[in-house]
Image (spheres, grey):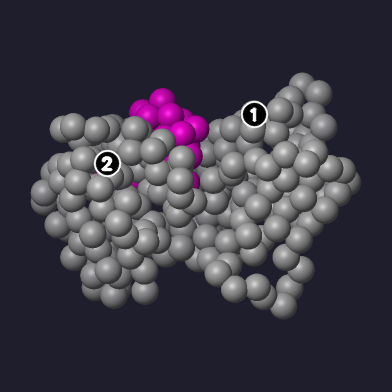
Amino acid sequence: MGKILVVDDEQSIADLIEVYLKSENYNVLKFYNGHDALQCIEKENIDLAILDVMLPDVNGFSICQQIREKHNFPIIMLTAKDEEIDKITGLTLGADDYITKPFRPLEMVARVKAQLRRFTKYNPAEPSQEENSIVFSGLVLNKDKHECILNEKPLSLTPTEFSILWVLASNRGRVVSSEELFHEVWGDKYFTNCNNTVMVHIRHLRGKMHDSAERPQYIKTVWGVGYKIEG
């Protein structure tokens, strides 16, 4: 079913997550500190990571950043306080989703499943029969290879960033609302602060593309409606 890395120094929470994920037949690799988790990442083929922000040695943001230097698997951050800055920081560093403690275990499982579905859909291990490449205006997207090339230069995108760009490029010329984008990429219909989550990822994606919100060459904001790419 998939190999899930769980990192939380609160043993009761880590154990609870493990129980619920194992009940769904996931293989869980559980750690109470960042150092051991980082060593595990070097040895194992991880499918998804759940990282607590506050750890005794290496914080979750640092682990997220180190993962993104080499790996594309989805990352879900756990934050103890409902502060927007923590969420924005995690998303900017390459996290795909966040869960605020205390959380409902079944919601956590649903988020894990949604991330794995999205990752499989937009980063398939095997080529499918559908169109897997998009090429226009100097932008090349290859879904099979999780590869993005802009003006002959490769861009290092997180799975979520790639998925957002793929959805917008697939619908170029049409405005895609934040809600529709969230549903397509995260697999959920809607949750609180959906617009902010999408906005942070769009901003980070624009930065990597050297695009501007004021004078965009690619991703345009249609205020009060959503985003679009014209091609």
Asked whether 91 falls inside the magenta stretch, the response is: yes
Q: Position of residue 55 (x, y in %)?
A: 20, 35
- The residue under the point 23% across, 40% down is 34
- Please tell me which residue is depicted at 20% across the width and 55% down the height of the picture: 30
Specify which label sits upstream in the sequence, 2 or 1.
Answer: 2
User: Which residue corresponds to the image point at 59% horizontal and 32% vertical from the top-left?
Assistant: 204
Look at mark 2 in the image and give the residue it sits on.
52
* Kind of residue at badge 2: Asp
The total of numbered circles placed on residues is: 2
Residue at the outermost top position: 214
Is residue 181 something that shows in the picture?
A: no
Q: Give left or right: position of 58 versus 117.
A: left
Q: Position of residue 129 (x, y in %)?
A: 72, 77
Q: Is residue 153 magenta?
A: no
Are the residues tagged 2 and 1 within 8 Å (C-beta)?
Answer: no
Where residue 171 sits, quadrant-wise, is bottom right
Q: Nearer the viewer, residue 29 or 160?
A: 29
Residue 228's disc is none
Q: Nearer the viewer, residue 199 or 47?
A: 47
Give me the residue at 24% from left, 73% from top.
Answer: 23
Q: Horizontal and vertical percent for residue 38?
A: 28, 45
Q: Residues within 10 Å of mark 1 (few under 14, many from 20)?
A: few
Judge from the rendering whether residue 32 lies leftward or rightward of residue 183; answer left or right.
left
Q: Amino acid at mark 1?
A: Gly
Q: Position of residue 68 (x, y in %)?
A: 45, 42
Is disc 1 placed on a helix, strand or loop?
Answer: helix
Camera-near label (2 vs 1) is 1
Q: Vertical placement of 212 versus 189: above or below?
A: above
The magenta segment is 83-101
Residue 207 numbered mark, or none: 1
Task: Look at the picture and state if 134 lies above or below 229.
Answer: below
